Image (cartoon, grey):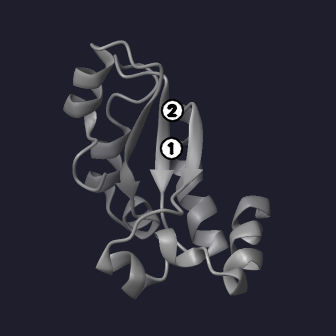
Amino acid sequence: MVNQSDLPFRILVRRYNTSLVYTQMLLPERLLNDREYLEFHRKGLRDGPDAPVVVQLCGNDPETVVRAARQVVDRADAIDLNLGCPQEAAREGHYGGYLLDKKDWALVESIGAHR
């Protein structure tokens, strides 16, 4: 949920006994290049009232996605590669649900296997 599942929202839904929450879909490039964005989205992870929490990333460049994941993995209970976003921005950026075509399976696999 882009721009919806921030810390206050996650805290709210945890009050209703959810077993797990997700961050909003985060942009790897911004996690790597925008300190304010990184700090805002790290807030509350792991030591906050929204744990356990899964950090959701989008992207199609294995190195960039993995480097961004390393910025938050120490505070996340899991990392998720978004493969469902149908938004126009995801189509234009070739990520989210637009990586589900068979032609992109090797790319998705390489993101998961990239170290």
Q: Quadrant of residue 45?
A: top left
Q: Is residue 66 depicted above or below 89 in this figure?
A: above
Q: Which amino acid does label 2 sit on?
A: Arg
Instruction: Identify the element where label 2 is drawn.
Output: helix
Would you say 77 lies left or right of 22 here?
A: right
Question: Pointer 2 and pointer 1: residues touching (CB < 8 Å)?
Answer: yes
Would you say 42 lies left or right of 83 here?
A: left
Neighbour tally class for label 1: few under 14, some 14-19, many 20 plus, Cα within 10 Å? many
Q: Is residue 27 depicted above or below 8 in this figure?
A: below
Give the residue drawn at x 53%, y 34%. 76
Q: Which of 42 and 99 is in front in this view?
A: 99
Q: Is residue 23 depicted above or below 109 in this figure?
A: above
Q: Nearer the viewer, residue 18 or 38?
A: 18
Give the residue drawn at x 28%, y 56%. 2
Q: Residue 92 carries which label?
A: none
Neighbour tally class for label 2: few under 14, some 14-19, many 20 plus, Cα within 10 Å? many
Q: Where is residue 99 in the image (x, y as percent from the top left)?
A: 58, 76
Q: Which amino acid does label 1 sit on?
A: Val
Q: Is residue 26 depicted above or below 33 in this figure?
A: above
Instruction: Identify the element where label 1 is drawn.
Output: helix
Give the residue drawn at x 31%, y 51%. 1
Q: Mark 2 points at which residue?
A: 75
Locate the C terminus and report the quarter of the image it occupies: bottom right
Q: Where is residue 22 in the image (x, y as percent from the top left)?
A: 42, 38
Q: Which of 103 and 65 is in front in this view?
A: 103
Give the residue drawn at x 48%, y 57%. 57
Q: Mark 1 points at which residue?
A: 72
Q: Where is residue 34 in the image (x, y as percent from the top left)?
A: 32, 62
Compute the Cα span from label 2 to label 1.
6 Å
